[in-house]
Amino acid sequence: MTHALKRLKNELGLLGLGSLALLALSTVFSLLVVKPLETRLRALEHERHAARQSVGSEGLKLVGANLQAARVADFYHYFDRQQRVDDWLARLHGIATASGLELRAGNYRLAESQRRIDRY
């Protein structure tokens, strides 16, 4: 067997043996790394498809990652409330009183701003 390896080394040369070793390593890498990852990918795609089927079309909201304007609009929409500011202040005062905090005096003024969110 050692004679056959020596003969193979002489016929292929150093470059040929390096190529065979690289081919063997790539095959091992494919079997040990790539194939399990492909199997995991198929399982995740199946899971995503099953989740999409179970939730239905009205339960999912697909948003692209580059839709910055939509994300900003959602941000400001979060702060849109139907309640008046007086109601919110009364609610905060009630929470503070229930927590044992006493505010002896308070002064709330609307700060002038050119932004879309008001500050007091």
Image: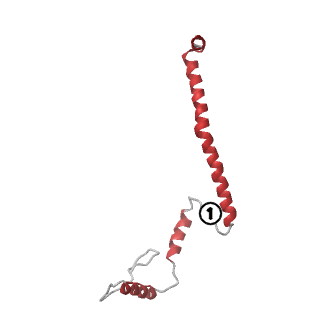
The x, y position of residue 111, in whole percent, is 38, 80
**The N terminus is located in which quarter?**
top right
Circle 1 residues within 10 Å: few <14, some 14–19, many ≥20: few
Residue 69: where, in percent of width, then height?
55, 65
Query: Amino acid under label 1?
Result: Leu
User: SS at mark 1?
Assistant: loop
**In the rendered image of this protein, does residue 40 appear above or below residue 62?**
above
| Residue 47 sits above or below residue 13 on the image | below
Q: Seen in the image, is 70 located left or right of residue 85?
A: right
Q: Residue at x 40, y 78 (%)?
A: 119
The quadrant of the rendering that contains the C terminus is: bottom left
Q: Name the image quarter holding residue 70.
A: bottom right
Residue located farthest toward the front when viewing the structure as drawn: 1
Residue sitting at 57 percent across and 29 percent down?
25
Q: Nearest the camera: 1 or 35?
A: 1
Is 45 or 113 nearer to us in this picture? 45
Residue at image location 70% in from the left, 62% down from the top: 53
Outermost residue, left side: 104
Q: Colour scheme used in the picture?
A: secondary structure
> What is the total number of numbered labels drawn onto the structure image?
1
Image location (x, y in percent) of residue 93: 38, 86
- Is 41 situated above or below 100? above
Q: Position of residue 37 (x, y in %)?
A: 60, 44
- Quickly name the residue at label 1: 62
